Image (cartoon, helix red, strand yellow):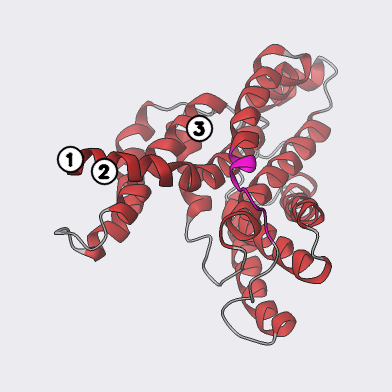
């Protein structure tokens, strides 16, 4: 078999693993931003979910419970963002970055405290077939699309993200919808983190999220704040992450391959951001 075909087969094998955590996190961003809350804390929420899943699996040897605890952790972190954004009218970008810094620092400290070794946990029980979560992610793309565009809840949520005052006049509880959307988005982002730990590697290590939360946020923008668009953008970014792995050891310098997914993220957003229109009230505090 020729080299291009071998590369294509290798990429096809790696691509789902690289795309799955991005899709979970990007769907979380799509839901929260359609409701008007910018969730730049996706990176920290993924890390929190990954760590919570590993600790739970380590203590209980129950992978299903580990994923459930990861989801609860993501919901709790997202609730913090929602509280400061809605109850305190705080800058959503600042709060999100604070959550990222706090979570990444706390998990790095707790790795040593819980496991007695710095940097990484020991191997824990994980999913025997992480492809289960890949299929869940793909199914959720369809589910989120149907909810956003084919249900009353979705119509109300998008109204809240576009014109919250008009939505409130029509009897829609803007604050409740924004809380719900942000917390649901946190649950999905944490699923992406759980995939990285108990799904793919069966450990937690410092820096394992490696900017995926920010790439997922870029995918939301590149995908025009739609589930299918964001999922397609995730596949695009994951493709180059897969090439990075497949082409290692070849003629292309390793340093270039390592920066390729992040470089393409910046290039894609820089070239696309001017043509992308977010929900009109995305990131704008709602004053009742």
Q: Residue at x 66, y 72 (%)?
A: 107
Q: Residue furthest left?
A: 251
CA–CA distance in space, label 3 to label 1: 30 Å
Q: Is residue 107 above or below residue 177?
A: below
Q: Residue at x 63, y 86 (%)?
A: 117
- What kind of element bears circle 3? helix
Q: Residue at x 74, y 14 (%)?
A: 151
* Mark identifier at residue 164: none
* Pointer 2 residue: 6
User: What span is in magenta?
Assistant: 126-134
| Mark 1 burial class by Cα count in 10 Å: few <14, some 14-19, many 20+ | few
* Pointer 3 residue: 231
- Rendered location of residue 172, percent (x, y): 82, 21
CA–CA distance in space, label 1 to label 2: 6 Å
* Magenta residue check for 285: no
CA–CA distance in space, label 3 to label 2: 25 Å
Q: Nearer the viewer, residue 27 or 92?
A: 27
Q: Residue at x 42, y 28 (%)?
A: 276
* Pointer 1 residue: 2
Q: Is residue 146 above or below residue 140?
A: above
């Amino acid at each position: 078999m020729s080299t291009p075909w071998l590369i294509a087969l290798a990429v096809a094998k790696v691509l789902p693993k690289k795309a799955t955590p991005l899709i979970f996190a990007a769907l979380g961003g799509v839901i929260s931003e359609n409701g008007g809350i910018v969730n730049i804390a996706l990176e920290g929420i993924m890390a929190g979910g990954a760590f919570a899943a590993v600790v739970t699996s380590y203590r209980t040897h129950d992978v299903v419970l580990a994923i459930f605890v990861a989801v609860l952790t993501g919901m709790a972190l997202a609730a913090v963002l929602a509280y400061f954004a809605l109850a305190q009218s705080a800058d959503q970008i600042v709060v999100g970055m604070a959550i990222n810094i706090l979570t990444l620092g706390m998990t790095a400290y707790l790795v040593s405290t819980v496991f007695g070794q710095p940097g990484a946990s020991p191997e824990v029980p994980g999913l025997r077939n992480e492809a289960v979560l890949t299929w869940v992610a793909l199914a959720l793309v369809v589910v989120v699309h149907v909810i956003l565009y084919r249900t009353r809840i979705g119509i109300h949520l998008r109204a809240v993200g576009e014109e919250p005052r008009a939505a409130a006049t029509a009897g829609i509880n803007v604050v409740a919808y924004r809380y719900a959307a942000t917390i649901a988005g946190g649950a999905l982002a944490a699923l992406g983190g759980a995939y990285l730990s108990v799904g793919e590697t069966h450990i937690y290590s410092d820096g394992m999220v490696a900017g995926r939360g920010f790439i997922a946020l870029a995918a939301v923008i590149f995908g025009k704040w739609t589930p299918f668009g964001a999922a397609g953008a995730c596949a695009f970014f994951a493709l180059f992450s897969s090439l990075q792995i497949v082409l290692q050891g070849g003629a292309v310098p390793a340093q270039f391959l390592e920066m390729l997914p992040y470089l393409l993220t910046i290039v894609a957003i820089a070239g696309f951001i001017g043509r992308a229109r977010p929900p009109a009230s995305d990131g704008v505090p709602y004053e009742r």
